[in-house]
Each structure stands twice: as structure tokens, then as C-alpha cells.
Image (cartoon, rainbow, N blue to C red):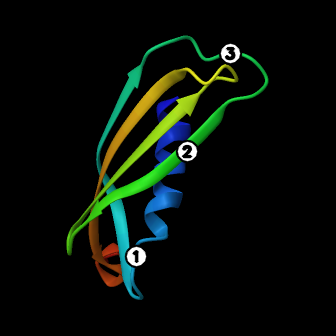
Amino acid sequence: IAALSDNVVSLCMVTALEEGEGFTTQDLQVKIFRPVSGPLIEIEAKVVNRSRTTGYVEAEWRLPNGKIAAKILSWKAIRPQESFAARD
């Protein structure tokens, strides 16, 4: 759940970036309420807050009956893209 959730909230965070910005996951919290099973799970993510250097994204995993299976809280550190370049 955590690895897929980090991908989902990261895709959501990309929508809030400006030209020349990149980010990395600073913190990821996964709260599991029920077992995740079955062929269909709905995952919805949204950027809750975006400052100059930090993004906060939440996601929910919902079962077909509408109940929340997991809640994801993620903080992203926003930096200029060149700060992610490989160093010699």
C-alpha cells in the first residue's frame, strides 16, 4: 500500500509544480483501517496545501462499498530541478 500510495500522491503533486521545480518525498504516513481486497479499489488524491518549499498531499483508498480502507498523508520537499542533478 505504501509504495503505490507514494506513486499516487507524487503524480498528484506534479500537477502543482511550476516550471523548473522538482520534489522528493519528505514524509509518508499510511493509516490502514480495513483489509484491502477485491478486484476494484478507488484511490483519490488531492493537493491540500502548496507553499514555496513544501507540498502536502492526501489520498484515500476506498472499497467498492464506499468505506475508507486507507488514508495517506504525504509531505513533499519542493526544490529547483537542478538540485536533483547528479554530482561528480
Residue under label 2: 44
In the rendered structure, which amino acid carries the disc numbered 3? Ser
Q: Residue at x 49, y 70 (%)?
A: 15
Q: For this view, does 35 lie left or right of residue 82?
A: right
Q: Confirm or deny contact between disc 1 and disc 3 (CB under 8 A).
A: no
Q: Quadrant of residue 44?
A: top right
Quadrant where the image shows the C terminus:
bottom left
Amino acid on which the number 1 mark rests in the picture: Leu
- Rendered view: 52 above or below 62: below
Q: Position of residue 30 (x, y in %)?
A: 38, 29
Q: Please name the residue shown 45% across and 54% down the image.
A: 46
Which residue appears farthest toward the bottom when viewing the image?
19
Mark yes or no: residue 38 visible: yes
> x and y percent of residue 79 in the render?
27, 74
Establish if 15 lies above or below 1: below
The reply to whether callout 3 and callout 2 are in contact (CB within 8 Å) is: no
Q: How far apart are labels 2 and 1 at the CA level? A: 19 Å
Q: Which residue is mark 3?
A: 37
Q: Nearer the viewer, residue 82 or 46?
A: 46
- In primary-sequence order, the first of circles 3 and 2 is 3
Indicate the secondary structure of the residue bearing disc 3. Answer: loop
Image mark for residue 17: 1
- Residue 75, compared with residue 24, is above or below; it is above
